[in-house]
Amino acid sequence: MAVDGIGAAVKRKEDFRFLTGRGNYTDDLARPGQAHAYVVRSQAAHATLGKIGTAKALKAPGVVAVFTGADLAADNIGGLPCGWGIKNKDGSAMHEPAHPVLAVGKVRHVGDPIAVVIAETLAQAKDAAELLDIDMKELPAVANMREALKPGAPVVHDGGSGNVCFDWHLGDADAVAAAFKKAHKVAKIDLVNNRLVANAMEPRAAVGEFDRATGEYTLYTTSQNPHVIRLLMGAFVLHIPESRLRVFAPDVGGGFGSKIYHYAEEAIVTWASAKVGRPVKWTAERSESFLSDAHGRDHVTHAELALDKDGKFLALKVDTLSNMGAYLSTFAPAIPTYLYATLLAGVYTTPAIYAEVKAIFTNTVPVDAYRGAGRPEAAFLLERLVDIAAAEMGMDRVEIRRRNFIPSNAFPYQTPVALQYDSGDYNATLEGALKLADYKGFEARRADAKKRGKLRGIGISTYVEACGIAPSNIAGALGARAGLYECANVRVHPTGSITLFTGCHSHGQGHETTYAQLIAERLGVGLDQIEVSHGDTNKIPFGMGTYGSRSLAVGGTAVVKALDKIVDKAKKIAAHLMEAAEADIEFKDGKFTVAGTDKAKTFGEIALTAYVPHNFPLDKLEPGLDETAFYDPKNFTFPGGAHICEVEIDPETGVTKVVNFTAVDDVGRVINPMIVEGQVHGGVAQGIGQALYENCVYDDNGQLRSGSYMDYQMPRADDLPSFKVATAITLCTHNPLGVKGVGEVGAIGSPPAVINAVVDALKDHGVRHIDMPASPQKIWGIINGNRRMAAE
Amino acid sequence: MPKVSMTVNGKNVSAEVEGRTLLVQLLREKLGMTGTHVGCDTSQCGACVVHVDGKSVKSCTMLAVQADGAKITTIEGLATGNDLHPMQAAFKEHHGLQCGFCTPGMVMSAVELAKHNSNPSEHEVREWLEGNICRCTGYHNIVKAVQAGAKAMAAAK
Amino acid sequence: MYEFAYHKPASVADAVKLLAADGEAKAVAGGQTLIPTLKQRLARPTALVDLSAVRDLVGITVGGGKVTIGAMTKHVDVASSADVKKALPALAALADGIGDPQVRNRGTIGGSIANNDPAADYPSACLALGATIKTNTREIAADEFFKGMFETALKPGELIVSVSFPVAEKAAYMKFAQPASRYALVGVFVAKGPAGARVAVTGAGPSVFRWKEAEAALGKSWGVAAVENLKASASGLNSDIHAGADYRAHLIGVMTKRAVAAAG
Ligand SMILES: Cc1cc2nc3c(=O)[nH]c(=O)nc-3n(C[C@H](O)[C@H](O)[C@H](O)COP(=O)(O)OP(=O)(O)OC[C@H]3O[C@@H](n4cnc5c(N)ncnc54)[C@H](O)[C@@H]3O)c2cc1C
Ligand code: FES
Ligand code: FES
C-alpha cells in the first residue's frame, strides 16, 4: 500500500485554502462590472398575480433593469423541469404542472419569485423593489396535506385531480392481505416525518455572465452537480446549447441535497446577464433560503406490521402521504417512491410488503431530497414499528431484530420491494454497537440517572440504505429522465504529475484528498503530484455530480476504470521501452518491471515518453497519457449499520439531552477513515437535529413560522455530545473498490435511535410513540398526561 | 459618504462607505477579503466572526463606520505565509472542517477562547461556540481541534 | 437596510442634542438588536447616534449598597467583573448567559433595557432587584420603567446613563432558553433584598413582570418549600411554536423553584 493510499487517514489537501480564507465560494466572486439582483418574492401563500407596475422602480437610483414573468414569457423561456416522472397506480402519468421561473398569473407559496430587480448595488435593488406596484389578490391557501385532500380544499394547481400529484404503489397487496389474516399480532403506528430545511451554511448564490464576443454564457453557481444544471437549464429553460453554456460550481459550502436542484435564480441571472450586458449576481439571504431552498421529508404515514407468535415479521403495509410543496422540484417524485418504499424491507426478512404513496401539492416551498432522501423516512418508520412490535409481543428489542435479520449468508438477497442487497452483516454491526455502547451496563446508568432525578432511556436502530442510485436503464424504466453514471478523466502530464477531472462535486466531502488517495495507491505517485478538479463543465467531460452518497461508489469507480486504462497504456509503453512482452510487465509502487529481470522504468519516465514520443510505438499506439471512463453501476450499494442512542430527560422541563451516541456502520471499504468518521459525525448531528430540534412549521394560512435561526433550531455545539463511531465492513460485491458510501448513513440511522431512546425513557408514562422533533414541550405534555400537547 | 480608516491584519486601509455598510461588506466587497463569510441575516451563525481590537465580534452586526480607527484581524491575518496559526493547524490535524464555510468564523471565535483559557474542557468549548453554527461536522472534531489548538497556542507563546 | 446619517458624539450632552434635533434619529449602543432590525428593514431611522465614544457611559462602580453600571457597559464586562461577581454574583451570571460570546462582546446593558425585548434577560434583574434607571434627565424605578412589549418609560430622545442595582442578600437567575434563538423562553430572577422578596419573570409574557404570589410566599418564608407547589397562571402568557402559555406557566414554577434553590 502506498503511504497515502487506500485506508490512510490522510489530512485533507483542501484544508489549507479553507483555513486561510482562500476558499473560492460563489459569493466571493466579483466579476468585472457585475450588477446585483434582488428577487422579489410573494408574501402570500396563494394569490392571483395581476399586472406588475415597474415604472417607479425603474427610475430609482442605481436600477439597471426590472424583469417579471411576462418578460421571460416574451423570450420564450421555459419552466423549471422535473427530472423524474412517476406513474399512478392505473399507469397514467403523474400531474406535472408548469413551474415558471418567475410566477405568472398566480403565486403558490410564500417565497414564490415574482420579479427581479437588478441594480448597481444590492441595497439599491432592495430599495427599488419596494417601489414595484404588484397587483395581487390573496386566495385561501392550504399547507397541511390532510386538509389538501378534503373536498373543497383550495386547489394549488388546476388541471389535476384535486391536490394529488400522484397515487403510486409498490409491492404485493394480495400477499400482504393474506399474511395479515394469519397474523398472531399486528403492530400499528401513525407517524409524521417532520419537514426539515437543509441549511447548508453557505446560502445559495448564482452569477450569470454573457460574453458578447463568443456568445458563451457562464453560470457560477452553488451546485452539487453543475453538468445537470447545464443540461436542464440549457435544454429546457433557456434553450442554450451546451457548447455555449458553461456552468461552474466552485467551492460550495455544504449541500445536503438542497443544492442538487435547478433553481429559478440560476436561470434568471444567466438570462438577465445577456439582457443587461453585464454579469449579474444573486446571493440568498438566510431568510430567503428558508423560502426558496427545497425542503426535505414531510411525510404522514400509517403502517402496520404483522407478526407470527415467535415475533417473525410476516408482512408490512404502509400508507404514506408525501408533501411535494407547491411545485415539483427537480427530483421530488423519486424521493417518496423509489428511494423510500423500496427500502421498506430494511434489514429484515419480511416476506410481503405493500406500500401506497400519495404525493400532495400544498402552498408550501417545494420538497425534495435532503440528506438521506427517502431512506431516513423508511428507516424511521421501520425502526419505530419494530420497537412497538417488541413491546406488544413482550420481546426484547435486540432479540426481535436479531430474529428477523437477513442472515449474513443470505446475500445476495432479493427483497419483496425490488432491491437486491449485495452484501451485509447486520449482526456484526449490531454486536459492535452493543459493545461500544456498553449496552449491558445501561440499567446501572439508568438507575444512577434516576437518583439524579433524570429519566434515562436507550434506543437502537438497525438500518440499511441504498446509495449510488443505478443502473441508468432500470432507473430510466422507472421514470428517471437522466443518466446515473459517472465520468472520470485522468490526465497524466508529461512530467508525471496528474490531474483528475471528476464529474462528482465536493462540497465538504474531501474528494480532493480521497480521489487523490485512489490515484496514489494505484500509480504510486505522491499526493502532492495529484490535483483533483471538479465543478467546471468546461474542464470536465461530463458528470452527474454528488448526491445520494455516490461519489466513491460511482465516481470513485469511474476513477478506477480510467486508471485501468492509464495503466494498460503505460504498460504498453513500458514494454516497448524495455523491449519486453506486454504480458511480462508488472506495475507496482510506481515502477514498471519486467518479470524475472531487473529492468525497471518509473511512472514518470513512462509519462514523459508518452508526451515526448521519440522512442515510442507510434505505429501501434497514440501518444499521450490521458484517459476517460464512464461508469454506470450494476446496482445500488447497500450501507447499513446499528446506531444506539442514550438520552436523559429532565421530567420537570421535558428537556432531552443525548448523553451517548454510538454508531457502527458498514460503509464498505474505507479509503480515508478520518473523512469517514467526519461524515458519520455530521450525519448523526443532523439526525439528532431532526429527532429533537429541527422543525419546519407552517401555519394554516401557509405562512412559514420557522423562517430563520430565531425559530428553526439548528443543532449547536452545546446541544450535542461527542460520538462513538466505528465501522464493521463487508465489501460491496459489484464495484472494484468494494465501497458502499458514507455520506448519509449518519442521518438515516440516528433519528429512530433517538426517538426509541426517548420512548424508552418515558416507558413508565405509557408512551408508544412520539413524533419528531421530541421537543421539551411535547415531552412535558406526555409526562403530564396531556395528549393534545404530545400530538402537536 | 463617510470615510473610514482602520488597520486590517496589520495594514492600514481606508475606504468610503455608506452609513449602512456593514463591516463584513467592507471586508468582502470593498477590500476583497472574502475569507470572512455570511451565513445568516439574524446574527446567529458566526460565519462572519472577526476580531475587532482583539475581541471576537460578528462583522455582520457591526457597521463599517463603527470600526473606524479599530484594529481588525480576519482569517486571512492568522497564518504567517504558508505556516498555519496553531489553531488553524489544529483544525486541519483533527479534521475540524468539511465544507469550510463556517471555518473562518469558527477559528476566529476559537482563538479568542484560547486567549482566555489555554486548556478548555469539552464543555467549555461547546458553550463558547454557541454562536457558531456548523452544519457539516457535528462539532465532534471541531471540539477536539479547539482543545488542541488552545494548548498549542499556549505552548507557542 | 435603508440609508441613514451617522454621528458619533463624545458626550451625553452632544448625543442628546443630536437626538433632539432629529425626531427620526436613533441611538445605537452595541447594535446587537438594532442592526439586525435595520437589516430586516423593520425600522427606518434617518440617523444613528453612536454612543460608543461617550466615555461617561462606561463603567462599573460598587459602593453604598449598590452596583451601578454605565449604560454602555458590555455584557462581557459585567460577566467578568470581579466586583459584580462579589457583590451581585447573580447579575454577573445573568450577563454571562446572554446570547453568545460575540454578542456579549458588543451588546450593552443600556441597549438591552431600552429595547425591553419581552425575552431579554436584564429586565428581570432590574425588576427583581428594584433597580433604578438613571437617564440624562431623571431617575426611574424599574417598576415604572418597563411598560409593555418593546415599550419603556423613556421619552423620545431620552438616554439611559446608568442602572443601579441594590445589592441583595440572596439572588439568582434561572433561564430556560428558547431552543433556537437562545433568548429566554422563561427566565426568572429571584431576590431577597432591601425591597423584600421579589420574583421577576421574563420571556413568558408580553413584557417582564413580577410574580406576586411567589413574592408573597417567599416573603413569608424564603425557601424552596415556599414555592414548591405554587402554580403560575397561564392567562396572558405568550404562545408560539416553541411553547404554549400553559407550558410557559409551568416553566415559571420550575425556574422559580430552581432560582430560589440556587440563591440559597
Ligand atoms: C444572536 C443574539 C443573541 C442574543 N441573545 C440574547 C439573550 O439571550 N438575552 C438577551 O437579553 N439579549 C440577547 N440578545 C440581545 C443583546 O443582548 C443586545 O445586545 C441587547 O438587547 C441590546 O443591546 P445593544 O447594546 O446591542 O443595543 P442596540 O442594539 O444598539 O440598541 C437597542 C435599542 O436600544 C436603544 N438604546 C441603546 N442604548 C440606549 C441608551 N443608552 N439609552 C436609550 N436608548 C438606548 C437603541 O436606540 C435601540 O432602539 C441577543 C442578540 C443577538 C444578536
Ligand atoms: S453572518 Fe451569521 S452571524 Fe454574521
Ligand atoms: S464545515 Fe461546513 S458548515 Fe462547518
Image: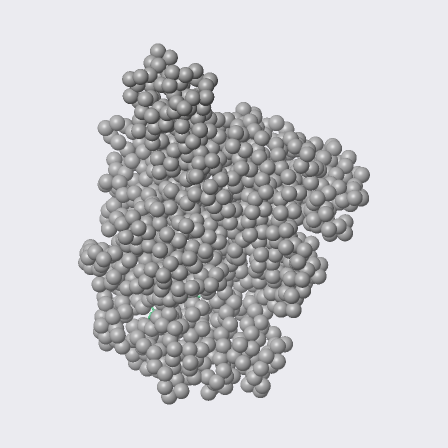
In the picture provided, is A284 more to the left or to the right than C198? left
Q: What residue sits 49% from the left and 74% below the top?
A: C173
Is residue C82 in view from this perspective? Answer: yes
Is residue C113 in view from this perspective? Answer: no
- Work out whether residue C162 or residue A363 is closer to the camera in this orientation and state it: C162
In the picture provided, is A486 more to the left or to the right than B27? right
- Work out whether residue B103 or residue A145 is closer to the camera in this orientation and state it: B103
Type of colouring? one colour
**Quadrant of the image containing the C terminus of chain C:** bottom right
Q: Quadrant of residue C14?
A: bottom left
Q: What residue sits 34% from the left and 28% below the top?
A: A604
The relative height of residue A720 versus residue A671 in the rendered view (above or below) is below
Number of on-image labels: 0
In the picture provided, is A193 more to the left or to the right than B46? right
The relative height of residue A501 versus residue B70 in the rendered view (above or below) is above
Specify the farthest residue to the top.
A619
Residue A340 position, x and y percent, is: 59, 38
Residue A634 position, x and y percent, is: 55, 27
Q: What residue sits 62% from the left and 69% below the top?
A: A452
**Quadrant of the image containing the N terminus of chain C:** bottom left
Residue A162 position, x and y percent, is: 57, 38
The relative height of residue A779 versus residue A389 in the rendered view (above or below) is below
Q: What residue sits 73% from the left and 38% below the top?
A: A315
- Work out whether residue A772 or residue A271 is closer to the camera in this orientation and state it: A772
